[in-house]
Structure formats: C-alpha cells, structure tokens
Amino acid sequence: MTDLNRLTLDQAMSALDRMGVDYELIGPPRAIQRVCSLLNREPNGLYYYSGKDPSVIGTLTGSVVICDRSIAVPTDSCSCIAVTEDPQVVFYRLCGALFDTRPAPGIHPTAIVHPEAVIGEQVHIGPYAVIGRSSIGSGSIIHAHVVILDGCTIGQRVVIEPNSCIGATGAVWIWGNEKERLTLPQLGGVSIGDDVFMSADVSVVRGLLNEDTIIGRGSVIAPGSKIGHS
C-alpha cells in the first residue's frame, strides 16, 4: 500500500520558501513524518492551529504546528512555524504544493469513448468510464465508472469522481387522454464550467428542450448530490 502522506520538515520549509510565505521556525527542528489533524493527534506530525489558545501547542509530541505569531511559544516537545497569514490558509496551500494525488493523463484501456467525443490535452479518463458525444476540456480528470452522456460540455481542469453520471434523463412525463404515460424526450445538455469539482456519486440531469443544466465555474459539489434538469 502506498503511503501518500510522507514529508520532512526540510521539505515543508522549502515549499514555504517557494510559496513566498513569511514564516519563522521557533524552536528546534523536529523529525516530522506527515501532516496531521488536531482531531487525530499523533507524534511527529505537522499541524496547523488557527486559534489563540497557546495551550494547544503543549498537547503535541515531537511535532511542529503552523500557528499565529502571537501564540508561537515552543514547548519541550513541539516547535512552531509562526506566520502572519491565516494558518489554515498557509497549511492548505502547503499541502497543495507538497502532495499531488492527481492521476496521470491518458485514457484507460477499459474506458469507452465515442469516436465523436472531443477530448482536450492532458485529460485523464479512468477505468470503465463511458464518454458519449461530448467534449472534455484540457486538464480534466474523469475517474472510474463515470458516465458522460451525449450533449455534455465539460470545462477545463474539472474533476468528476467515481460513479457519477452527467447528462442523465429526468422523469418528465404527463398522463395522456387515454391514460397513457407521455414522456418528453430531453433534448438539452449539460454545461460544466472550468475548475469544477464533483465528488463521487453525483448525478446531473440534462436540460429539457433547448436549454442546458449549467454548473458554474469553480463549483464544488458534495458526494451523492442530485441536480435536476435545466
């Protein structure tokens, strides 16, 4: 099993230097091993703390905490990376710089891609994904078992996690004069803007007639969300 969460203090501080963060290590260097959460404290971690209670620092063993300069007082077992910015913002940026969990670009051999689909550069399409007559922008990541049906436009740097369906058909029908069910064919599409993140098991229903269901640029959609037509 690959452990994605491994780093040293030198790696963390080098990344902070590259990011241009104004910081100061207060206390001796520690042999940190990975980034950690205060909700699951363990020795030799790199933490962040955005509060103003310095006693939190004393609960950490062999660790380093990114915190506000006003409370950056090291203990026998914990040093501080004192910052002037919001420590949470610094920590998130640091993790983004240190850890890249994106899969490599390419189309998995088990994926099914319609010959009329338009696939941008540096796109990842995972195992058993199905791509219809749609377009996928450059740098996007389509994970395993995602289905993108006809008439969908996916922007650049979009991430769609496993078991999601884009362009599903909604239940649009009425009772006819003879009490038969009349189903309206859904002729619209789905338009997803750039830099959207969709977690696992998201369904987006296509537009009805001459409209799209639109997911705006930069949207973040939680697991299991269901988005109706138009």
Image (cartoon, helix red, strand yellow):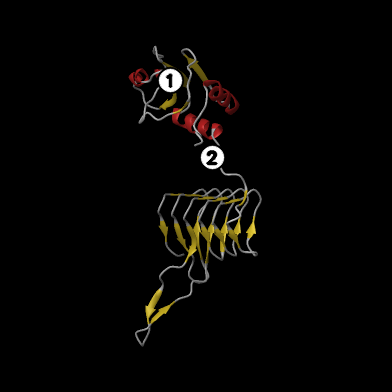
**Rendered location of residue 230, percent (x, y):** 46, 64
How many residues crowd around disc 1 within 10 Å: few (fewer than 14), some, or many (20 or more)?
Answer: many
User: Total number of numbered labels?
Assistant: 2
The relative height of residue 41 versus residue 76 in the rendered view (above or below) is below
Q: Quadrant of residue 51?
A: top left
In the picture, the disc for residue 63 is 1
Mark 1: secondary structure: strand
Q: In the depicted view, which residue is nearer to us: 166 or 153? A: 166
In the picture, the disc for residue 37 is none
Question: Which of the marked residues, 2 or 1, is nearer the chain's N terminus?
Answer: 1
**Rendered location of residue 222, percent (x, y):** 42, 49
Q: In the depicted view, which residue is nearer to us: 65 or 112? A: 112
Q: Residue at x 48, y 24 (%)?
A: 33
The relative height of residue 212 versus residue 101 in the rendered view (above or below) is below
What residue sits right under mark 2 in the picture? 101
- Residue 43 seen from this side: yes
Q: Residue at x 49, y 15 (%)?
A: 29
The relative height of residue 197 versus residue 12 in the rendered view (above or below) is below
Q: In the depicted view, which residue is nearer to us: 30 or 65? A: 30
Q: In the depicted view, which residue is nearer to us: 144 or 77? A: 144
Q: Residue at x 55, y 37 (%)?
A: 100
Mark 2: secondary structure: loop
Q: Residue at x 39, y 11 (%)?
A: 76
- Residue 65 seen from this side: no
Q: CA distance from mark 2 to mark 1?
A: 24 Å
**Rendered location of residue 133, percent (x, y):** 60, 65
Query: Hey, which residue is sitting farthest front in the picture?
Result: 1
